[in-house]
Image (spheres, rainbow, N blue to C red):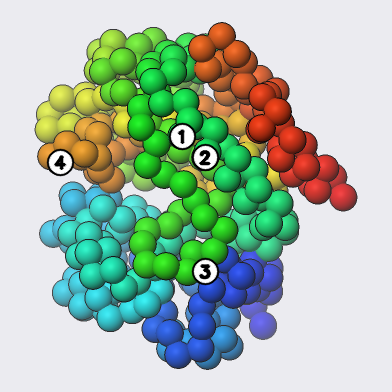
């Protein structure tokens, strides 16, 4: 058996059986592209078939964009296939979430969609196979609930490279659940997303990695200045032009605003510089989405992302995160310490 498949097998098994609750007789579709690590896709496919699911792998050309911008490039066979599946694991990157075919599948309320994106075999193992998912979700739930209760609070985020941005926290609409057993859209555990009131975001964000037209670790930091909307970008070496294009593409010719922030906390992830989905779950990272908010026309998944590391975060006058580490309050600290203690065993 391929060594990559062996490395992925434990994570794929926990993903399919324990987290996504795949049952015999269910129809499972794995979508991949010409840049996907096919050994990873084949490992997940093998697990699905061992469970007794009717599983298929569909490989398409790599999409140039994500979201609705990808619509003209999605083949008809994929559009038909996703409407006939119970479980849809998307390993394409750029991903299919937010496209018309994805929206159509979600409106049918049949399939459970998971955005796996650019995860490698090691990434699947790290996210799903090497840690107790009950312990991980204990903190995941605590963080998601904590953020949901802070709507309207003033948030400040900093990083060692000079990020210093503040905003009003908007309404929370994203909570991850332990068992993905009902139709809907899901993303891997290990990060919590939170939404600002877009026009309230002010300050500077110093990016270390970006997902513009592809994901890359920057040769030099990129500075994003904000005063409600993005006012300027500079730095990033040769990637400045690609980021400029991506920002303007996502916001109808303008630079747009900040759509979301996040906090990565998965104990087993490793910063790779080439896997966006794993890197944004490394402890202390923050994936920041730019463009048009999802509730406005043209908004949603048509956006570039930037990554900062070792973030610190304040809610009002209380420091909650220091250099990526949870400092309080107790409702967060207790499950966080439990998670860290499980990591040390």
Q: Residues within 10 Å of mark 1 (few under 14, many from 20)?
A: some
Dot label at residue 110: none
Measure how far apart labels 4 and 1 are at the Cα level. Answer: 25 Å
* Classed neighbour count for the residue bearing mark 3: other residues with Cα under 10 Å, few (<14), some (14–19), many (≥20): many
Q: Which residue is mark 4?
A: 298
Which mark is on residue 144?
2
Q: Is residue 3 above or below residue 238?
A: below
Q: Position of residue 296 (x, y in %)?
A: 17, 36
**Residue 148 disc label:** 1
**Would you say 20 lies left or right of 322 here?**
left
Identify which residue is drawn at 54% across, 64% down: 179
Are there few (<14), some (14-19), or many (20+) residues within 10 Å of tag 2? Answer: many
Tell me which numbered mark, 3 or 2, is placed earlier along the sequence: 3
The residue drawn where x is 16% and y is 74% is: 76
Give the camera-side residue of 49 and 150.
Answer: 150
Left or right, 25 with respect to 178, comes to left
Residue at image position (71%, 37%) is: 336
Q: In this orientation, which residue lies closer to the viewer: 106 or 61? A: 106
Is residue 323 shown left or right of residue 280? Answer: right
As drawn, the label of residue 20 is 3
Q: Nearer the viewer, mark 3 or mark 2?
A: 2
The answer to whether residue 145 is seen in the rendering is: yes
* Figure check: 17 above or below 139: below
Placement of 240 over or under 83, stated as above or below: above
């Amino acid at each position: 058996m391929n060594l990559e498949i062996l490395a992925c097998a434990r994570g794929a098994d926990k993903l399919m059986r324990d987290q996504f609750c795949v049952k015999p007789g269910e129809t499972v579709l794995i979508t991949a592209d010409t840049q996907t690590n096919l050994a990873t896709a084949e490992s997940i496919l093998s697990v699905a078939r061992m469970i007794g699911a009717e599983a298929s792998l569909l490989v398409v050309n790599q999409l140039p964009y994500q979201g609705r911008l990808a619509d003209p490039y999605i083949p008809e066979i994929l559009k038909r296939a996703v409407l006939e599946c119970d479980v849809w694991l998307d390993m394409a990157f750029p991903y299919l979430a937010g496209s018309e075919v994805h929206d159509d599948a979600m409106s049918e309320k049949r399939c459970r969609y998971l955005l796996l994106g650019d995860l490698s075999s090691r990434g699947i193992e790290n996210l799903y196979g090497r840690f107790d998912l009950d312990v991980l979700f204990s903190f995941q739930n605590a963080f998601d609930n904590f953020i949901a209760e802070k709507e309207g609070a003033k948030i400040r985020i900093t990083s060692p490279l000079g990020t210093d941005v503040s905003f009003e926290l908007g309404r929370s609409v994203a909570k991850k659940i332990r068992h993905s057993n009902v139709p809907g859209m899901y993303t891997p555990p290990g990060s919590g997303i939170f939404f600002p009131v877009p026009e309230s975001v002010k300050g500077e964000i110093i990016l270390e990695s970006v997902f513009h037209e592809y994901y890359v670790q920057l040769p030099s930091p990129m500075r994003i200045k904000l005063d409600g909307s993005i006012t300027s970008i500079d730095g990033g070496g040769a990637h400045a032009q690609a980021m400029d294009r991506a920002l303007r593409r996502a916001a109808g010719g303008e630079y747009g605003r900040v759509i979301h922030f996040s906090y990565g906390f998965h104990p087993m992830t490793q910063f790779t510089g080439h896997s966006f989905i794993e890197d944004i779950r490394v402890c202390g990272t923050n994936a920041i989405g730019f463009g048009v908010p999802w509730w406005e026309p043209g908004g949603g998944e048509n956006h570039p992302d930037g990554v900062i590391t070792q973030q610190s975060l304040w809610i009002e006058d209380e420091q909650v995160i220091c250099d990526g580490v949870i400092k309080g309050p107790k409702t967060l600290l207790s499950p966080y310490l439990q998670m860290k203690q499980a990591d040390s065993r």
